[in-house]
Structures are given as C-alpha cells and as structure tokens.
Image: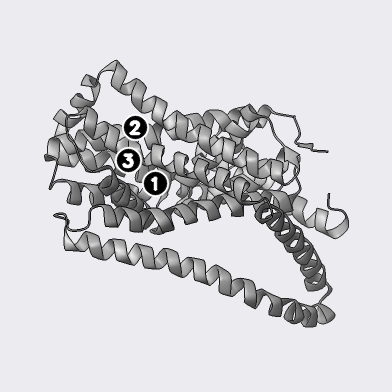
Amino acid sequence: MYRGDATAWHDAWFSHRSFARHAFATAMNSERVADAGLPRRGRAGVLLVVVALAATLVVPLFLGGEQALRATLHLSASGYLILLAAITLSWIARTLKLQLLLKRMQFDIGFVHMFEISLATDFGFLATPAGLGGYAASVYYIRRAGAPTGVAAALTAADQGLDLMFFALALPLAGIAFFGADVPPRLIATAAGTFATLVGLTLAVLVARRKWTKWPAVLDTLGRRWPVVRRAEHALTEFCTHMLAQLRMLADGGAGFIAGVFALTVLQWLTRYGILWLVLLLLGYQVSFWLLLALQGLVLHVAQWSGIPAGGGGAELGLGATLTTWVPATSLATALLLWRMVTLYLALLVGAIAIARLARRRSRAVPMD
C-alpha cells in the first residue's frame, strides 16, 4: 500500500467525493447531487448524454418510422431470451477476465462484486464523451474495493490492451473473410483507415514508453525550483513504477495465462458484436457475421472517437447507410432498435443498478497469500 505524499495524492485524485459528483452522479442526475447544486458543466454533460441517447432512437425511427418501432414488440419471447443470453455471456466473460487479471496481481474480488464493477465501468464508457468515464470508473471502483491505485491502473491498462489486441487482429481477419464480396469502396477505405489508426496507437504507446525515460530528468530539474512539482513528481514516479511492476507481473503470467484472458476477451466481444447478427437472423435476414463484426468495429470506434456519448446516432447512420444493401430500410430500422435496446439501453440500466449497489458496498479486496 502507498504511504506519505503518494497516498495523499492518490486519495485526493480518486476520492469518492470528487469522482462520484463529477462523473457518475452527474450522469445519473441523482437527487443528492442535485441538492448540492450541479455546476453548469455538469448540467451541460447531462444534456449532452440525453441528446446523444435520443439521437440513437431518432435515426432508426427516421429510417423505418413507427412501423419499425411496432415491429420490435413482435419479436418472440424466445428471441428476446436469446439476445439476453448473448449479452449476459459477454458481461460474464469480461468479469472473469478482470478477475483473472486481478488475481494474477495477488488481489481477489468476489465474482458478484467484480460483475457490478464491470457493469458500472460499461456505464461509464457508454454515457460519457469518448468513453473517458469508463477508465476513471475502472480505477475508482477497483481502488475503492481495496486494491492499490497502481494495481487498479494496471488492471485498466491490461483490459484495454487486450481489447486493442482483439480488434487489431479481428478487423483484418474480418476484412479477409468478405474480401471480393460486394462491399462499398467507402467501407473498405474506412476499414483500412481504422486499422491504420489502431496500429498507429499501438506504435505510439511503444514510442511513448521509450520516451518516458527522459521525463524524470526534466521533472527533477523543475522540482529543484518548485517543491510542489517535486512532490507531484515523486508521487507520479511512485505510481508509474508500481503500475509498471504490476503490468510486468501480468506479462510474466506465461502463455497459458495470456491465452486464457485473451480467449475471454474474444468471447466478450464476439458475443457483444454478435447481437446485431442474431437480431437480423431472428428477423429473417442472413448477413455475414464477419461483415457485421467489421462494420460494428469500424462505426462504433469512429462514433466513440467523435467524443459524443454512445456515438450520438453516428453508429446508426453508419450501419444504416451500409446495410441497406442487404436489408430493407424498415427491417434494418427494427434491427437497429433491438440492437441498441440490448447493447446500450439495457447496459445503461444494469450499469445504473450496479452503481447504486456499489455505493452501498463496504467489502474490500482481499490480498492473496
């Protein structure tokens, strides 16, 4: 555990008061925060989330009208159960992945507790601009469960690194799967651009890792002049040292461990991105699974990078413009509504419930012997 300046710095940064008010409580618009008075930026953030979520409904309704909305009610009960089972399997896979990563770093959090943390971080990714709230939520809740900040940050970095690895492999493979098919040229160009961006991000991380060695000398020079900078540099260095040590511990887990957590990552995303394929199949349309995987990977990442929560209808526009080649507009609008109902609205609902449950928790992570 941390002591001294590092502890004070971490506690101040990740305290319940600052994070809950400015991130999750703002998104949930709770009465307690409203009574304390939301700042103008908080109100603007809530308005942005509401408008963005409304846009995800407006686009499908524009494509299919009221008929598309009524058609969502005609899906069989077994169909809804299949969709629910698929998204639940995705949530469970991510929870198990996080548990394995945390256990490798010698900390243990119960499955139900970790399941709630996973759902709460999904809420953060979906309901905040560019998904930034998801990163903060992951570190905050893991640390609140009793793990050191370095462990929480390493867990978040490893989780995102595994996701990046999956998409860096899956998008090219999906592109190969429908190579030569009747795919719009703009889709191929977008796919190539997104893949290049993912590769660029990976290279940037590697370059930044090498450049990091030069920063301590710069901060040390500034620290001699300003004590505040020296204390911040000491806390930051201690934090990064501990986080990198935890990441090295994960990397030293062996091929079996890495294969296991990556397999869970694959299961997590294939089931989540398989929802749209299942919806279309239930509506009577057979569209290539790999095509839908690539399309979702492209439009959802582009929508997230736009900085608008949940893409603000951008994902629906992208999928609608592309999939009309294979699916009529009305049926496609119904499919998009059902897809968002499961992957967005249901995820936000269970995420809000998880946040409420986590707020009442007092249990702590248990260091493993």
Q: Secondary structure at mark 1?
A: helix
The residue at which mark 1 appears reads as 310
Q: CA distance from mark 2 to mark 1?
A: 12 Å
229 or 94: nearer the viewer: 94
Structural crowding at the residue carrying mark 3, measured as other residues with C-alpha within 10 Å and reported as few (<14), some (14–19) or many (≥20): few
Residue 87 image position (x, y, % from top left):
42, 32
Q: Secondary structure at mark 3?
A: helix
Tag on residue 54? 3
Structural crowding at the residue carrying mark 1, measured as other residues with C-alpha within 10 Å and reported as few (<14), some (14–19) or many (≥20): many
User: Which dot, 1 or 3, sits closer to the camera?
Assistant: 1
Residue at image position (68%, 43%) is: 102
Residue 120 image position (x, y, % from top left):
55, 37
Q: Earlier in the sequence, mark 3 or mark 2?
A: 3
Structural crowding at the residue carrying mark 2, measured as other residues with C-alpha within 10 Å and reported as few (<14), some (14–19) or many (≥20): some
2 or 231: nearer the viewer: 2
The residue at which mark 2 appears reads as 341
Inspect the image, locate mark 2, and give the three-letter code of the amino acid beneath it: Met
Can you say which quadrant of the picture contains the C terminus? Answer: top right
Q: Earlier in the sequence, mark 1 or mark 3?
A: 3
Inspect the image, locate mark 1, and give the three-letter code of the amino acid beneath it: Ala
View extreme (front): residue: 255
Query: Residue 232 sits in which quadrant?
Result: bottom right
The number of numbered badges drawn on the structure is 3
Residue at image position (24%, 62%) is: 188
Q: CA distance from mark 3 to mark 2?
A: 12 Å
User: Which dot, 3 or 2, sits closer to the camera?
Assistant: 2
Does residue 344 appear left or right of residue 26 in this picture? left
Residue at image position (82%, 53%) is: 7
